[in-house]
Amino acid sequence: MSHLDRAIELAEHGRGTTRPNPVVGAVVVSAGGEVVGGGWHERKGEPHAEIHALRAAGESARGATLYVSLEPCNHHGSTPPCTEALIEAGVAKVVVGSRDPNPVADGGVERLVAAGVEVEVVDSFEARRQNEAWRTWVSAARPFVTYKVAVTLDGRVTVPGSRWVTGEESRRLVHELRAASDAVAVGMGTVRADAPRLDARDVPADRQPRRLAFGRGPLPPGSELELRSGPLRAELDALAVEGVQSLLLEGGPTLATAFFAEELVDKLLVFVAPTLAGAGPRFLGDLPDAVSLTRLSARRTGGDVLLEAYVHEP
């Protein structure tokens, strides 16, 4: 494992406790090549990963190389700038996994270079992916949108005579995705047809996501969903102001097509079942233009295959 990979791994220890900040990890390697410190951002308002790593390294930080998953901050927020701490500690080189897209806190690389610190920007996809929701939230002022859909091998979203399209393992993963999301949404067509709960069930969940319905109401009696009836972009802007960084879209083809048409989908998760439905609605309608996807990957989930790809990389 590389030192940067270790920094990315350390960052995950802060998952769920740093909000609304990103997760960040750092590793200090002495001039002799020995790992002498490491740390991660633990909670908002507390020291950042670089500070924890420098404290662990002590005097060994002088002349050392610091590996950090996200560009060191260069502003006074809840804590002083990490750039100044690195310069004061005498670090010789900083290896940055990803640039900071936050216009309030960027400029760390330039500040370090101006002080004579050698800087290498790796631009690691894994480092960017680790904070994909936060990166979109701070740079585009809207939530990062993931469209999740279960389909048959012929692209249908229903199977005649069956309640489910995919198997139990895939459905459990969907509940894990809900638990990891700030909000989950469907369209009113799905609300009226299925009365979905959209909560995370039978999986570890520190909190439940906000559960939304996009479209024109009214909601059916007893529904616990929030109705969002405005234009999609305006609703996403409002959700971002309310602190929603990630949105899991589970709606049917009408809502999904509307999100794609307005270029508001960032990632696509397609659970493909080994079934030919032969009839029924497909998971997307007609789009005004072709959509190019990147970072396509596939893995087994029980008897199904999960395809993952990005429309907009973080």
Image (cartoon, helix red, strand yellow):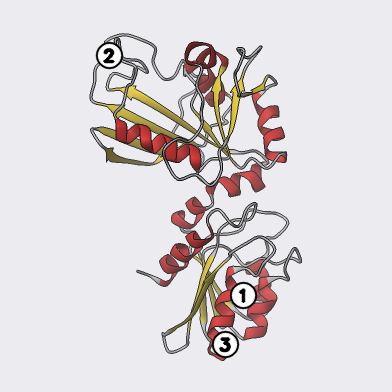
Instruction: Tell me whether circle 2 and circle 1 mark residues in contact (CB < 8 Å).
Output: no
Residue that numbered label 1 is attached to? 51
Query: What's the distance in space between the residues labelled 3 and 1, CA to CA?
Result: 10 Å
Q: Residues within 10 Å of mark 2 (few under 14, many from 20)?
A: many
Q: Is residue 120 above or below residue 254?
A: below
Query: What's the distance in space between the residues labelled 2 and 1, CA to CA?
Result: 56 Å
Instruction: Tell me whether circle 2 and circle 3 mark residues in contact (CB < 8 Å).
Output: no
Query: What's the distance in space between the residues labelled 2 and 3, CA to CA?
Result: 63 Å
Q: Residues within 10 Å of mark 3 (few under 14, many from 20)?
A: few
Q: Residue at x 42, y 41 (%)?
A: 203
Amino acid bearing label 2: Ala
Residue that numbered label 3 is attached to? 58
Q: Earlier in the sequence, mark 3 or mark 1?
A: 1
**Image quarter in which the N terminus is found:** bottom left
Q: Is residue 126 left or right of residue 45?
A: left
Return the x and y of residue 191 as percentages of the image width and height. 54, 16
